[in-house]
Image (tube, grey):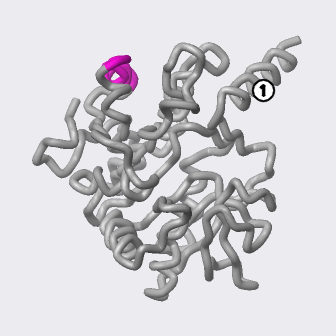
Amino acid sequence: MRREQSNSHSARCTRMSKASIESGRCVNVLILAGGQAGPNADDDGYPLCLAEINGAPLIQHLISLCEAIGTIRIVVAFAKTDIDKFHIDSAIEVLAPGAAIVSVEKYARGAACTALLAAGYIDSDDELLVVNGNELIDVDFRAVLDDFRGRQLDAGTVTFSSIHPRYSYVRLTDDGFVVEAAEKRPISAHATAGFYWFARGSSFVQAAEEMIYKDASVNGKFYICPVLNELVLQQALVGVYPIKPGQYRPLKTVRQIMQQESAERRGYQ
């Protein structure tokens, strides 16, 4: 297991598939779970990524979904307090041997800032997938990436229909390309599901740094979705992969976790 303080720029590739080996493609997967303490923690103080869904922690479900991609390098960002108190890095080593752990020392100003703490692992020409550590998407991750690659996109995001201001949004052209992204502001009915793919990790890092330089924050925080605006300004092709609202399961609060567990219990009856 490697930590963010290391000088290494990559974690070990895992879950190698025949197709991925033949293509030589390895995807860096960054799971953001660094801001789940405090009021978002469960009754015992555990971060929500450890909440058990159908008998397994949420983070385990998420890693399993990522493994379907093929050859991946997993990087997970956790709050240092969660690492020290709950040894969550040891749990990740069991689930994904060789994964890199990014320790978020202090409260970061949003997901984009947390992601940039992992720049040493993701700032490369390899593909990058950024996913939130407190939600599940009922979709084949590999099929999504294959779709983005087949359309020769520079970046892509999974979307579902909503107008609730808790989500991030993208506005599309008639051809389905992203022309604008916004956080906590429904500029369309295309809400994003916390799934962001970039053909090159270096493109994300550069765009995120440019966004922060422009101080394009929302309520004092920098988010992932508005990074797409910087790519649009560079005339990059950014597309979407639409799913049904029921395929997106946000698990950002204890209440949402309980609702998910209740729904699963009803499904078994």
The kind of secondary structure the magenta stretch mainly shows is helix
Q: Is 92 rendered above or below residue 221?
A: above
Residue nearer the viewer, 10 or 132: 132
Name which residue type carries label 1: Gln
Q: Position of residue 96 (x, y in %)?
A: 36, 28
> In the drawing, does residue 176 fall left or right of residue 121?
right
- Residue 204 falls within the magenta-colored stretch: no
Q: Position of residue 257 (x, y in %)?
A: 69, 27
Q: Would you identify the image quadrant in which residue 24 lies? A: bottom left
Q: Residue beneath label 1, please?
A: 259
Residue nearer the viewer, 127 or 116: 116
Which image quarter holds the N terminus?
Answer: top left
Is disc 1 surrounded by few (<14), some (14 to 19) or many (20+) residues within 10 Å? few
Q: Is 66 rendered above or below residue 255?
A: below
Residue drawn at x 54%, y 65% as measured from the top left: 218
- Residue 88 falls within the magenta-colored stretch: yes
| Range of residues picked out in magenta | 85-95
Residue nearer the viewer, 246 or 188: 188
> In the drawing, does residue 109 fall left or right of residue 46?
left
Residue drawn at x 37%, y 56% as measured from the top left: 113
